[in-house]
């Protein structure tokens, strides 16, 4: 076969570019059996080129093409077809005939409803790790976990096709053109100083490096991008390094402009290497259907088994302890576990830090972090994985922050996953799993996806647990936001919680008719462009800003729990009790002041809240409510801009 595309260069090393194709993506197939009431079709699948739907993957080695072909598999290939621009008019089609070279195919199947003239017919190949979501209106690809092989990368590719139906063609679609929504990479990584065979886990991060994407199946003619998660990472848990210090890795990627792309590699002996793939100063356009090949040499930055013995700095406001590397962060983690809560001591991040895989949160319920941690507008990158949480277990960058603790100016871009929890008493947040009384979380954000089997799962904070009343103290979450998808996968036979900013303020009273807490304030916060899901649907609570609250008070006239100047525009919230700002499953009181939401009001959500003014004002836009929220907020340091983003005054 002839490859017509000439090779060009990308980034700052020669890269091979060629049109690519393969056994493409997969759907979690549902039971969509053809019916005789619909229309049986014959589809000629093409790409508008002589190679048909399956073109050649090409890469250059020593100036020569290495050719990898991927042919149609008549026995196993399935295609999901949508008719009339309607996701519900869906059927599985089979390969009924092949061209002699097996690079083109004829597809046959029966749609439930007959096609209409001028309407779209859309399709994608369903053989990999791609699923349909949102009632089949979107195709979702999760790039975050890959195995580093060619075959594994191919399973992430999306081959999507569309055509306009012409009634004159009867039961035939003569030219359904497919196009790729995926790019591929082959990296040869060199590890200096490695002289024996070993393995490494890789974590690839970067700006606009998508860990998840969704494209429309039929909306707006289909195929257009609906959502891209530009946080998280691409993780390859085990690659083989030979005795020459080389490893070859394949992965799939959503195509867009990316920069500041890095690889963190942890070897079996604890050594950590970093690779610069694309520098922060260079932005590179990654294109659909292209295959990129290049090599990089890494730099060893240390070993996680050899942590520093002291921090740089004095731990004061003028000279805070410096957190510059993953090793500094691990030292803080170890020190708190050993009983040093750093009460009153100051820390400051001096760079972004990548966490690659299994992580133990800083602090727990018995040994809390009580210092002041300034992220200095840096980010946590990569992936934080927690294999299991024990009773009262906590997950996040920090596990538990106790009295006087402050976390500020920090963004979590890492995906957080908790595979298993012992019971409902488990708490997960992107920044911190649980906070106690008199804690401040200020100007923090979570934009990574959080998926956890736990009782309580929040974007920024999992739970605030406060059981001693002191009217002079205040626990405060201010100028924080979440855009990551939050999913609580647990099905405990107990109430579970999920929320955009915080999942569960647990406000406990030790005495009857006594206000249960010091002042608890959530102010100037928002949640947007995400999904919030509780798998348990009989007792769960989900909210856009606050998942749910509890407590003994029966009136919303007390001001010790205040939700003020907050907004939410989440894509969807799924739980038993739902509130667009906050939900409540019991007579829990809270005051809501000058908040704004997009979407319908859920009648069983937050029914005991005192809805103030614009909570469900569907006649106003976010831009129209900005001034009122800023006035109500009254911050001397922060404000919402015209689009609702949090900025400095």
Image (tube, rainbow, N blue to C red):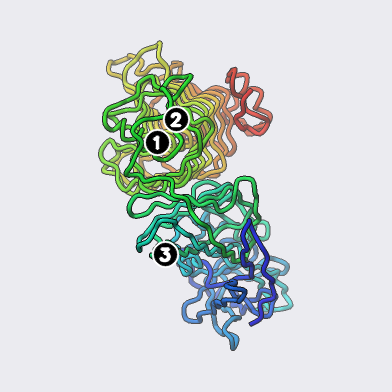
Quadrant where the N terminus sits is: bottom right
Residue 376 position within the rendered picture, expressed as x and y whole percent measured from the top left: 52, 30
First in sequence: mark 2 vs mark 3: 3
- Residue 375 place in picture, x, y as percent: 49, 31
Seen in the image, is 208 located left or right of residue 502? right
The nearer-to-camera label among 2 and 3 is: 3
Q: Does residue 497 appear in the picture of this structure? A: no
Instruction: Identify the image quadrant of the C terminus.
Output: top right
Location of residue 125 (image quadrant): bottom right
Residues marked 1 and 2 touching at CB (< 8 Å): yes
Could you say whether the residue bearing mark 2 is in a helix, strand or loop? strand
Select label 3 or label 1 by which is in front.
Answer: 3
Instruction: Identify the mark at residue 136; answer none if there is no mark.
Output: none
Q: CA distance from mark 1 to mark 2?
A: 8 Å
Name the residue that disc number 3 marks. Answer: 244
Task: Name the foreground residue: 592 vs 388.
Answer: 388
Residue 116 pos. (x, y %): 68, 68
Asked if residue 423 is positioned above or below residue 478 in the image, the reply reads below
Residue neighbourhood size for the residue with mark 3, other residues' Cα within 10 Å, grouped as few (<14), some (14–19), many (≥20): some
Q: What is the CA distance from the residue labelled 3 to the residue labelled 1?
A: 31 Å
Disc 1: which residue: 328
**Residue at x 39% of width, y 51% of height:** 266
Side (left or right) of 37 relative to 331? right
Which residue is tagged 2? Answer: 322
């Amino acid at each position: 076969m002839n490859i017509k595309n000439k090779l060009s260069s990308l980034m700052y090393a020669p890269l091979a570019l060629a049109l690519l194709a393969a056994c493409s993506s997969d759907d979690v197939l549902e039971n969509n059996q053809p019916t005789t009431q619909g229309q049986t079709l014959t589809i000629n699948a093409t790409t508008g080129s002589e190679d048909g739907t399956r073109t050649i993957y090409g890469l250059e080695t020593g100036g020569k093409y290495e050719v990898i072909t991927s042919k149609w598999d008549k026995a196993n290939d399935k295609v999901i077809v949508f008719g009339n621009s309607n996701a519900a008019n869906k059927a599985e089609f089979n390969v009924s005939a092949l061209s002699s070279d097996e690079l083109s195919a004829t597809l046959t199947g029966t749609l439930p409803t007959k096609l209409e003239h001028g309407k779209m017919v859309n399709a994608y190949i369903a053989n990999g790790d791609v699923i349909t979501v949102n009632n089949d209106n979107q195709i979702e690809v999760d790039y975050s976990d890959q195995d580093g092989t060619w075959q594994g990368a191919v399973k992430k590719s999306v081959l999507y096709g569309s055509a306009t139906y012409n009634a004159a063609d009867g039961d035939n679609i003569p030219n359904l053109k497919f196009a790729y929504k995926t790019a591929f990479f082959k990296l040869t990584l060199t590890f200096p100083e490695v002289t024996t065979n070993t393995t490494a886990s890789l974590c690839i991060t970067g700006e606009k490096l998508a860990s998840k994407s969704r494209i429309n199946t039929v909306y707006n003619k289909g195929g257009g991008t609906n959502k891209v998660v530009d946080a998280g990472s691409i993780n390859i848990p085990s690659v083989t390094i030979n005795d020459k210090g080389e490893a070859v890795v394949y992965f799939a990627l959503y195509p867009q402009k990316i920069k500041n792309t890095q690889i963190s590699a942890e070897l079996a002996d604890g050594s950590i290497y970093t690779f610069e793939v694309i520098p922060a100063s260079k932005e590179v356009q990654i294109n659909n259907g292209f295959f990129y090949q290049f090599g990089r040499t890494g730099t060893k930055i240390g070993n996680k088994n050899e942590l520093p013995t002291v921090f740089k700095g004095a731990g004061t406001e003028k000279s805070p302890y410096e957190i510059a590397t993953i090793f500094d962060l691990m030292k803080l983690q170890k020190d708190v576990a050993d009983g040093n809560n750093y009460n009153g001591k100051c820390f400051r991040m001096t760079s972004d830090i990548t966490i690659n895989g299994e992580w133990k949160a800083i602090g727990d319920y018995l040994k809390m972090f009580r210092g002041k941690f300034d992220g200095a507008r840096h980010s946590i990158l990569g992936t934080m994985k927690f294999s299991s949480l024990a009773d009262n277990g906590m997950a996040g960058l920090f596990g538990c922050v106790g009295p006087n603790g402050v976390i500020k100016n920090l963004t979590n871009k890492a995906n957080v996953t908790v595979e298993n929890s012992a019971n409902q008493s488990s708490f997960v947040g992107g920044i911190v799993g649980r906070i106690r009384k008199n804690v401040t979380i200020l100007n923090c954000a979570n934009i990574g996806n959080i998926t956890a089997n736990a009782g309580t799962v929040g974007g920024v904070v999992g739970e605030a647990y406060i059981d001693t009343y002191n009217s002079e103290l205040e626990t405060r979450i201010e100028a924080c936001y979440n855009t990551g998808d939050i999913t609580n996968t647990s099905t405990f036979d107990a109430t579970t919680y999920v929320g955009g900013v915080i999942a569960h303020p647990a406000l406990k009273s030790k005495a009857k008719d006594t206000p249960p807490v010091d002042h608890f304030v959530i102010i100037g916060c928002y949640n947007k462009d995400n999904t919030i899901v509780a798998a348990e649907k009989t007792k769960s609570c989900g909210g856009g800003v606050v998942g749910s609250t509890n407590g003994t008070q029966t009136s919303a006239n007390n001001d010790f729990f205040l939700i003020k100047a907050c907004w939410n525009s989440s894509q969807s919230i799924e739980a038993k009790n739902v509130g667009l700002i906050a939900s409540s499953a019991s007579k829990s009181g809270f005051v809501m002041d000058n908040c704004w939401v997009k979407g319908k009001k859920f009648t069983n959500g937050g029914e005991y809240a005192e809805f103030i003014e614009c909570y469900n004002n569907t006649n106003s836009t976010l831009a129209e409510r900005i001034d009122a929220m800023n006035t109500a907020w009254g911050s001397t340091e922060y404000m919402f801009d015209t689009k609702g983003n949090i900025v400095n005054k």
